[in-house]
Amino acid sequence: MLSAFARAFRTPDLRKKILFTLAIMALFRLGSHIPAPGIDYTLVEACQAAATQGATTALGFANLFSGGALLQLSIFALGIMPYITAAIIVQLLTVVIPRFEALKKEGQSGQAKMTQYTRYLTIGLAVLQSSTLVTFARNPSSLFGTQSCTTVMPDDGTATILIMVLTMTAGTGLIMWLGEQITERGIGNGMSLLIFTAIAAGFPASLGAIWTEKGWTTFALVIAIGLVIMTMVVFVEQSQRRIPVQYAKRMIGRRQYGGTSTYIPLKLNMANVIPIIFASSILTLPTLIAGFNRPNDGSVPPDWVTWIDTYLGFGTNQTHWIYMLLYVALIIFFTFFYVSVTFDPVDVAENMKKYGGFIPGIRAGRPTAEYLSYVITRITTPGAIYLAGLALIPLIAFNLLNTSTDFPFGGASILIIVGVGLQTVKQIESQLQQHDYEGFLR
């Protein structure tokens, strides 16, 4: 990997792309520290200092994907989350809406239209999420997880709120544009690299807090465990079940086509990080609803609010067995759900039959679809268990370490860091290989 980066910097074209990508990533991080209009950053810092930890907030998961910009109420507070949500919704709608399914099959032109729909939906979701965030900013005690935080907006008038919503929505649009610039003029995977940047930005603070609170021994132990976890994640993410496919020979005119062998690569973790995002979002909803129904005068809250705070709340309550059991169940459910939506064995079998392909020993058509469905079920089961175990690592580590910071090596963060890192290395290697071929042809 290091040799690939060294060769890339020695190649003028790739060096320009890498430097351009790094400049965009730096600009993205700069925007994450610029406060939105109407926000007193001094009061925000005081609320962050008063909070016991970032994970106690109801929007802690969204704060992870924004690189801490959400709790800083910056112009990039929403981060990349509206785009992620829009992309997932559009992908799921391809199964429900025939128009989207037809666009998916049209190739590059259809994909361009789907991307345009994703952009429109991203802006709509940004308006909705920025409005919700401003509502939390008007009552920052629920946002920062501490009752001592009373205000971060000296002026909460209508004009100020509208300007904040407009600014955060424009920030999301700018982030989306920056990601597309990385894809077109950089090394590719623009949105993924911005997510990588946002998550990786929180690693030094988390590791530094562990060192300060627990000392050098615990810090070294956490680093060692993190390296082991990263190695295991790389191994699982690279694991594939390759189903062999043979194409029959066909004569078209005087030319012979087919007769080649290939395979269908089925990853062990086909759902990637989506089930963890879905499960965390679902478990966040009860806490958000309870926060709006919690009395501010110090009186006793309703029984159902107390139950949610006790068993489904954030912080130490995340290590309760009820929360962890629901978390695991939701991850397993969404893993099977997402895989069933994104991979259709019947469609794959029909396409294989159309072009004369078959799996050796399996008849074409319905038997092939049944075989693929059987294999997918057997692959998805350990994949779902793997995702659930990975998501529980931060919760278990939080309980064992008894620290006020999050455990960085686990859950969605480590999965995205490793996944995007592997994709980026492959992208650079492919561009290096292409450059070598161009030099050979010249």
Image: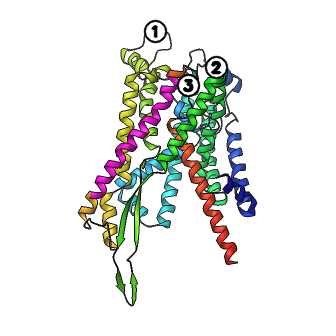
Relative placement, left or right, of 139 versus 239 is right
Image label count:
3
Residue 213, numbered label: 2
Determine the CA span between mark 3 and mark 1.
Answer: 20 Å
Among the two numbered marks 2 and 3 on one chain, the one whose residue lies closer to the N terminus? 3
The part of the image, by quadrant, that contains residue 312 is top left
Name the outermost residue toward the top.
299
Which quarter of the rendered picture does the C terminus lie within?
bottom right
- How crowded pointer 1 is (Cα within 10 Å; few <14, some 14-19, many 20+) is rated as few
Residue 381 is a magenta residue: yes
Residue ID for mark 1: 299
> Looking at the picture, how far across and down is residue 182, in whole percent?
64, 55
- Quarter of the image for residue 60 reads top right
Residue 270 picture location, percent across and down: 42, 50
Picture quarter containing residue 326?
Answer: top left
Residue 118 or residue 62, whichever sits in front: 62
Camera-side residue of 160 and 18: 18
144 or 319, nearer to the observer: 319
- Position of 355 with respect to 136 (left or right) is left
Tell me what residue is drawn at x 63 percent, y 17 percent.
Answer: 50
Residue labelled with disc 3 = 143
Label 2, secondary structure: give it: helix
Which-is-in-front pick, marks 2 and 3?
2
Q: Going from the N terminus, do you reach mark 2 or mark 1 first?
A: 2
* Residue at the image point whose x is 45% and y is 43% from the top: 274
CA distance for labels 2 and 3: 24 Å
For disc 2, the neighbor class at 10 Å (few under 14, some 14 to 19, many from 20) is some
Is residue 430 visible in the rendered image? The answer is yes
